[in-house]
Amino acid sequence: MTGYLVFAVLFWLGAWAFNEWLVRQHPKSPATRRAIGIAVPVIFGITLLVIWECVVRGFNIPSILLPAPSMIWARIISSTPILWADFRQTFLKSVITGYVAGCSLGFVVALLIDRSPFLQKGLLPIGNFVSALPVVGIAPIMVMWFGFDWPSKVAVVVIMTFFPMLVNTVQGLAAASHMERDLMRTYAASWWQTLIRLRLPAAWPFIFNALKINSTLALIGAIVAEFFGTPIVGMGFRISTEVGRSNVDMVWAEIAVAALAGSIFYGLVALAERAVTFWHPSVRGGRA
């Protein structure tokens, strides 16, 4: 017991000191700066896993309460076909389909609202109300309407992603200043020309903010929706089933896969944001 805990403390102190040294470096090479930016969170994550492993082994915590990372990794390796089938059902079918449909629909409706003050005053309050509804209340209704397979999960994801995209896009389209709009009018620009050349570029940071928020909401919504009815496959189904069987290591394996998929999904959206809004101060940072 003592050996594991001492090793955890020493590893934590060493990793902390090394990270402190790394963040104080100011290399001139952009590649080196990017490498340091990646290394710091990786070292921090490894440190957490090592401490987790040592605490579980040092205090002899039962695996049913908290399995060690090594046990979770062994379950991932031994259950790869099951995890892949669950990932394909939940993420590739429900999350991606619902995410694209919900964000696209929210964007289109935001354009319609921008053209109609009546819709702006009538639909936005309803959108704020619906966005506050808990997913545990929406999911059973969607299952009754669309069945137990993935379309009902897509419906939940659409509802969860539609209104964040709607609200953020409407706010983004209003971000352009009156002086800039007056300038476009002096050029006799049409509504579409003003939208494409001025208002939509100004709205991109707001739109990508919604896309990043929805990248996590979509995964959460799909997994929770699977708790209320699904075929015998899916991340939410597996988590709820394996908890009942006390196979906690499998539950954590599903959680690890979901966390990894969600992080990669969020990272891809963030990379797209940097490519599209490279001109924005939040992206340029100190590179001006």
Image (cartoon, rainbow, N blue to C red):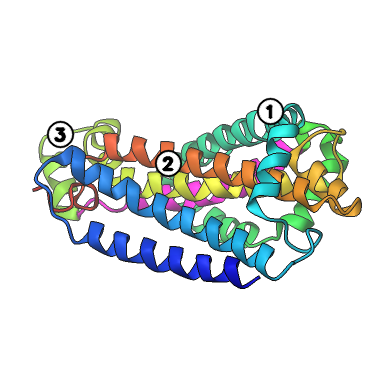
Query: What residue do we see at 70% from left, 48% from top?
Result: 71
* Residue 267 image label: 2
Q: Which residue is mark 1?
A: 88
Residue 135 versus residue 269 in the image, above or below: below
Please indicate, yes or no, whether residue 170 appears anywhere in the rendered image: no
Other-residue count near label 2 (Cα within 10 Å), few / some / many at <14 / 14–19 / ≥20: some
Q: Secondary structure at mark 2?
A: helix
Residue 182 versus residue 4 in the image, above or below: above
Q: Main secondary structure of the magenta part?
A: helix
Question: Magenta segment range?
Answer: 153-177
Q: Quadrant of residue 99?
A: top right
Residue 204 included in the magenta stretch of the image = no
Front residue of this view, candidates 204 and 232: 232
| Three-letter amino acid code of the residue under disc 3 | Ala
Rendered location of residue 69, percent (x, y): 64, 52
Query: What residue do we see at 19% from left, 42% from top?
Result: 32
Query: What residue do we see at 71% from left, 60% from top?
Result: 134
Outermost residue to the front: 3
Which label sits in the foreground, 1 or 3?
1
Rendered location of residue 35, percent (x, y): 27, 42
Quick check: marks 2 and 1 in contact, CB under 8 Å? no
